[in-house]
Image: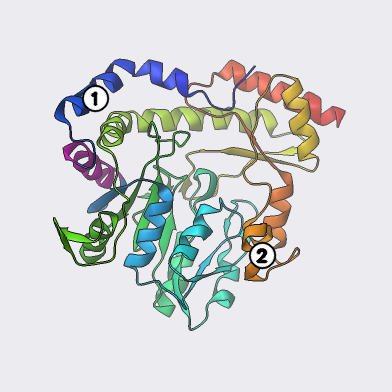
Amino acid sequence: MIPFLDLKAQYKSIKSEIDSAVLGVLESTQFVLGENVAAFEREFASYCGVAHGIAVNSGTSALHLALLAAGVGPGDEVVTIPFTFVATVSAICYTGATPVFVDIEPRSFTMDPSKLEQAITPRTKAILPVHLYGQMADMGAILEIANRHGIPVIEDACQAHGAEYNGRRAGSLGASGCFSFYPGKNLGAYGEGGIMVTNDDAQAKKVRMLRDWGQEKRYHHVLKGFNYRMEGIQGAILSVKLRYLEAWTEARRARAREYDALLKDSETVKAPAQLPGRRHVYHIYAVRSADRDGLQQLLQADGVQTGLHYPIPVHLQEAHADLGYTAGDFPESEAAANEVLSLPIFPELTSSQVEQVVTAVRREANVA
């Protein structure tokens, strides 16, 4: 069986460092926030090329607080895409604002800037592009439109640790950027975790208070806040893993290039595109197939694990039927949801395994 992801292999490769870091937290008894979290905040902010990092308990919490720090609230609208994990939209709803969707650009699966301006209204308080699968949205075009309208851009970079747009890291182009450290992410915690990064001193200060019950200092509650604090153990683990992130990223990119080369002549399976000026970090290697479900079933029978990211766009999810969208409203998102299949990709995946996966894909595609 070729796994979709192998977290055990990664842990074994850095076991001694991880174990030492965890034991250090246990000995320090700084279990919530503390110096290990503060150190990771500084390190990750530096990695992204920004001034501030505010660690929280999930990527969803990071999005929620970034929206609040930008002044988003009831009666406002936030523009995003429907082809994303539901947390993007949930974070908007938590603020009391209304999600407004624009369709994706089919090559990158990210926000189509040509459709953005028509979605902006006097109620638009923020634009939330999603750097899906590890490739950044067209931030130049998005920021040009946003700046012309005086609207802040918040980057959903939960799948894009280390991705770049014209040499600038994800999270550094908008008013703020939000990352998830869910275990399967390119930089994953051993549990839940997230971070909001920004160059804005005022927003950083506000998010630091909001994540910790709105406290400016202990028992001085300036804002109505939340319990969104990162645990010390996660901060220590992430500091260790951050040192390996670039090597792991290049391993992912190398495997992706091998997939690209082996799939380039396929008539039934379309490999993902890396667009000019963007560094794709391949959190997901998503191919497209007209018979996606059949291909997935056949690959599973052939010993290849795959994933679906994501089979139902948010505008067609039952939980968000109240937004009033229907099938056909966002054809590119709906087509992608019906066609994408995520093949195995992780730093420890071998070239031989990539060849085995592609051999199976080609065989099953021809059968289908």
Looking at the image, the residue that sits furthest to the front is: 219
Note whether residue 49 is visible.
no
Determine whether the residue tagged by mark 2 lies in a helix, strand or loop: helix
Query: Magenta span: helix, strand or loop, mainly?
Result: helix
Give the residue type at disc 2.
Ala
Left or right of 6? Residue 229 is left
Q: Nearer the viewer, mark 2 or mark 1?
A: 2
Whole-angstrom CA distance, mark 2 to mark 1, is 45 Å
Residue at (48%, 80%) from the top-left corner? 123
Residue at (56%, 53%) from the top-left corner? 86
Q: Which residue is mark 2?
A: 321
Q: Residue 224 is drawn in which quadrant?
A: bottom left
Residue at (64%, 69%) from the top-left corner? 322
Q: Nearer the viewer, residue 352 or 23?
A: 23
Determine whether the residue tagged by mark 1 lies in a helix, strand or loop: helix
Q: Position of residue 166 (x, y in %)?
A: 41, 52
Q: Residue 340 is drawn in which quadrant?
A: top right
Above or below: residue 240 compared with residue 235: above
Q: Nearer the viewer, residue 218 or 143?
A: 218
Note whether residue 20 is visible.
yes
Neighbor class of circle 1 (other Cα within 10 Å; few <14, some 14-19, many 20+) is many
Give the residue type at disc 1.
Ala
